Image: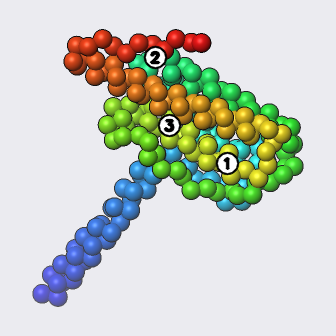
Amino acid sequence: MRMIVNAKSVAIVSMALAIVVLPWGSAQAQQSRMGATTRPAMGVKEGPFAGHTEMHNAYTHLEEAKDYLGKSKDVFGPHRANALTSVNNAMASILAGVQAAGAGAKADARETSEPPVNETMTKQQRRMMPMMYDAHYQLLQAQTDLRHTADAYGGNRDKALADVGQALNEVQAGMQYAEANQAAKSTGAKPAATPKKN
């Protein structure tokens, strides 16, 4: 009889642990997918980004954004290509700024930053255009990191911020373009016109 009671007790405890642990694990998995990357607690100490942790983090997030943009479907008019151009320009500005400052010349004021909330995207956009949604999130991360740097890097940080902002605008415009075309197809209306370059 005692063995039966103990077995039941173990089962009850196991179920309780599962109830507590599973939601936490699910939340961690979701956070990981959304690009909340783990950052080095002591900062970057080696390589060209040594002492420039936030610039390193921003560059890494831009690499992720570039990857997502490249994998997204070609249904966003000219906006996806424009976003990629802005991302490349931002990455070039970050490298130029870090190289001009020199390795370890000026450490960042902050080595970590809270991940931003992707509030501008709807649940439908996230479901229908996951690659663009994730690219937008990574761009927000890069924007946050750049804003937290302790140095202007000879104006290169501001250039990178401007290009990241432009990339965010292009991603949003591209998603709106794709949604308008999808709605037009479903109703038989004329598709959205591709914007002309000035």
Evaluate if marks 3 and 2 touch, with contact meaning CB atoms under 8 Å apart: no
Residue located beneath label 3 in the image: 136
Q: Give the amino acid type for the residue marked by disc 2 in the picture.
A: Gly
Q: Give the amino acid type for the residue marked by disc 1 in the picture.
A: Arg
Q: Of callouts 3 and 2, which one flags the residue occurring earlier in the amino acid sequence?
A: 2
Residue 9, given in percent of the width and then of the height, sits at: 22, 80
Q: Residue at x 63, y 40 (%)?
A: 60
* Residue density around tag 3, few if under 14, some if 14–19, many if 20 or more, within 10 Å: many
Alpha carbon of mark 3 to alpha carbon of mark 2: how far? 17 Å
Alpha carbon of mark 1 to alpha carbon of mark 3: how far? 17 Å
* Secondary structure of residue under mark 2: loop
Residue 94 in view in this figure = no
Q: Residue at x 54, y 34 (%)?
A: 168
Give 195 or 14, whichever is nearer the viewer. 195
Disc sitting over residue 77 in the figure: 2
Residue located beneath label 1 in the image: 147
* Secondary structure of residue under mark 3: helix
Evaluate if marks 2 and 1 touch, with contact meaning CB atoms under 8 Å apart: no
Q: Of callouts 2 and 1, which one flags the residue occurring earlier in the amino acid sequence?
A: 2
Q: Give the amino acid type for the residue marked by disc 3 in the picture.
A: His
- Colour theme: rainbow
